Image (cartoon, grey):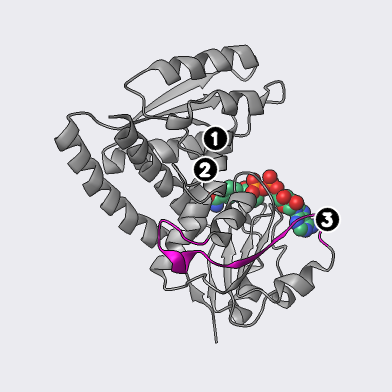
Amino acid sequence: MAAEILDGKGISKQIQAETKTKVAEFVSSHQTTPCLAAVLVGEDPASQVYVRNKERACKRVGINSQLHRIDASCSTTELLELVNQLNQDPSVNGILVQLPLPDQIDSRRVLDAIDPAKDVDAFHPHNVGLISQGRPRFLPCTPHGIVQMLKRCGVTTTGKHVCVIGRSDIVGKPMAMMLAQKDSELGPEMANATVTLCHSRTANLTEITKQADILIAAIGRPKFVTADMIKPGATVVDVGINRTDDGLVGDVDYEAGMHVAGHLTPVPGGVGPLTVTMLLENTLMAAKLQV
Ligand code: NAD
């Protein structure tokens, strides 16, 4: 039987409609509109698309957005000055520095300079620490989007074996951390997983992935996950976004996955739209925390 496709785009629309209502309520009770400031360094085409999508999404739900462009040749000091300026600006609730940054920039220093109360990507060590202790201020956008999608599609994680491939600070590590907790913002049924975090040095990867009830691929390699790596009936979440000659391709061989998985996310139209949507939720949360 073919896998059920998890419609990230449709779920995003549903969540954005909910966010829009919450933003309107916030504006009417506080007479101030939440605002997201995006920092874009250089002209990287993919980054420009991502930032534009985030601006459009803000507009859809009634959140103000600002775009701060800086030349690709800028220094770490210049970028830190801008971040400090945005930290001090009371009209800015959330700050997002679009990654990747050019090689000459010390990315870690820049991300660490963002006020943790405005860190809507949840990359600051303070926020990462809170997530690891199970008392998050902000949830990281991509992992949060994945949990939202699973919940809304009736896929719970408690007691399940979840295998995450990829140990990035943006997706893999926070995803594993969140699902292993005792509880979550979305209820205990969306936590309490037995999590295996795999990476480039994992031995016998296929042996591990094919035991997973839920397989989350965040690798950045087109069609890396093949049919033999998937447990029949498993839920497969494809985080990968790979630009190839055939267009955008995920980390999962979609055609093969269709025949083995029970649920499968498409690329595009799966996890991507949810990431942007959860950024909006975090911006609203930041505004609430700052009133
Ligand atoms: P990354 O690029 O920082 O790291 C890749 C990870 O994959 C590493 O942890 C590495 O250990 C692992 N890996 C590499 N080769 C492997 C192998 N042969 N076997 C097992 N593991 C291997 O990771 P990232 O920033 O999480 O990005 C991963 C993918 O997800 C990229 O395609 C990226 O574009 C995409 N992404 C999508 C969204 C979204 O919203 N859909 C958000 C963030 C990232």
The three-letter amino acid code for the residue at tag 1 is His
Mark in the foreground, 1 or 3: 1
Residue 10: image tag: none
Q: Is residue 246 visible?
A: yes
Mark 3, residue position? 201
Mark in the foreground, 2 or 3: 2
Q: Judge from the rendering whether residue 193 lies leftward or rightward of residue 102; answer left or right.
A: left
Mark 2, residue position? 130
Give the x, y percent position of residue 235.
56, 73
Q: Look at the image and give the residue range highlighted in magenta.
A: 182-202
Q: Is residue 269 visible?
A: no
The three-letter amino acid code for the residue at tag 2 is Leu
**Most common SS among magenta residues:** loop
Q: Judge from the rendering whether residue 43 lies leftward or rightward of residue 52; answer left or right.
A: right
Q: Residues within 10 Å of mark 1 (few under 14, many from 20)?
A: some
Which corner quadrant holds the N terminus?
Answer: bottom right
Mark 1, residue position? 126
Residues at circles 2 and 1 in contact by the CB criterion of under 8 Å: yes
Q: Residues within 10 Å of mark 2 (few under 14, many from 20)?
A: some
Q: State which tag comes first along the sequence, 2 or 3.
A: 2
